[in-house]
Amino acid sequence: MIHFIDGQFLAKDSINVSIDDRGYYFGDGVYEVVKVYDGELYTAEEHIERLFQSASKVKMTVPYSEQQLIDIAKELVKVNGIVTGHIYMQVTRGVAARVHQFPNPGTAPVVTAYAVHNPRPMKTIENGVRTIIVDDIRWLRCDIKSLNLLGNVLAKQEAYEAGCAEAIFVRDGIVTEGSSSNMFGIKDGVVYTHPASNLILNGITRRVVLKLCEQNGITVKEETFSPDEALEMDEFFMTSTTAEITPVIMIDGKAIGSGEPGPITKKLQEAFTRQIPVSVVGE
Ligand SMILES: *Cc1c(COP(=O)(O)O)cnc(C)c1O
């Protein structure tokens, strides 16, 4: 596969990255994942814009324009022949001897990106997934898509060890989000999700779903709910760039609603599929 690093497109095996990269020492960087459907980038502008926002929130500059980053992503799709997959893109604060404070202003941020073939996860989209609840031990700037993902990594691992696909974070008695997804509950026809704040990553898929609710006459309340309320929901689902809209059929061993993907979730999934350019279904 051909990767992008610092202005060049290179074969993965020929790439050397510095051991002094601050991404390596501190996780000092930000990233994005952009979905590719039928060889086309999906909601790329929104993702690139969020990358700039994440960078700005940690006082980092991105050494390219939004259009240049989109062009890099398009080139990766092309040279790697990606039909359905995604682009991963990250920016670190650059290469410098390891001290916590920022390096000299002249230090160039390091931009890397790659493309990967990744079919739509149709099995879990159709059948749903099981989840567990874990303590949200992360920092208080979850609105930044930071490379620092230890809290997320530990949560996801705990879920996998419990035979589940995702961990649902709870902070101060409130469901915030998943380890790599946003969480939605449906009660009496109303869709609930944690408001966009410093406690969650405001997902692009989350925003698409909010728009689809509006377009389909489904009431949404960006209001918090507790784990107990989550268990009492009629339906539950999670969203992310790669998971799209995935039904959550079980939380901590307890079935949600009928224990199967619910009707409003399915309606939203159909609306989602209608607005992505897919002529082929996933695997
Ligand atoms: C990336 C991410 C999401 C989902 O965001 P999308 O833009 O929909 O992919 C949700 N939560 C966390 C913690 C994430 O890192």
Image: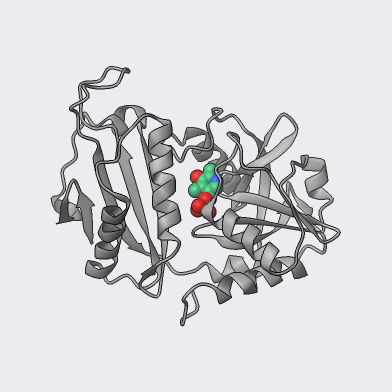
Left or right: 237, with 279 as reference point = right
**Percent x, y for residue 273?**
57, 73
Left or right: 218, with 280 as reference point = right
Left or right: 30, with 114 as reference point = right
- 63 versus 220 height, above or below: above
Query: Which of these two is toward me, 174 or 196?
Result: 196
**Percent x, y for residue 23?**
31, 33
Question: How was the colour assigned to the protein in this rendering?
Answer: one colour
The residue under the point 28% across, 49% down is: 65
State which quadrant residue 41 falls in: bottom left
Query: Which of these two is toward me, 144 or 254?
Result: 144
- In this view of the protein, can residue 51 be seen by the observer? yes
**Percent x, y for residue 190?**
80, 57
State which quadrant residue 245 falls in: bottom right
- 71 versus 54 height, above or below: below
Query: Which of these two is toward me, 90 or 160?
Result: 90
The residue under the point 59% across, 53% down is: 165
- Quadrant of the rendering where the N terminus is positioned: bottom left
The residue under the point 20% across, 30% down is: 95
- In this view of the protein, can residue 262 be seen by the observer? no
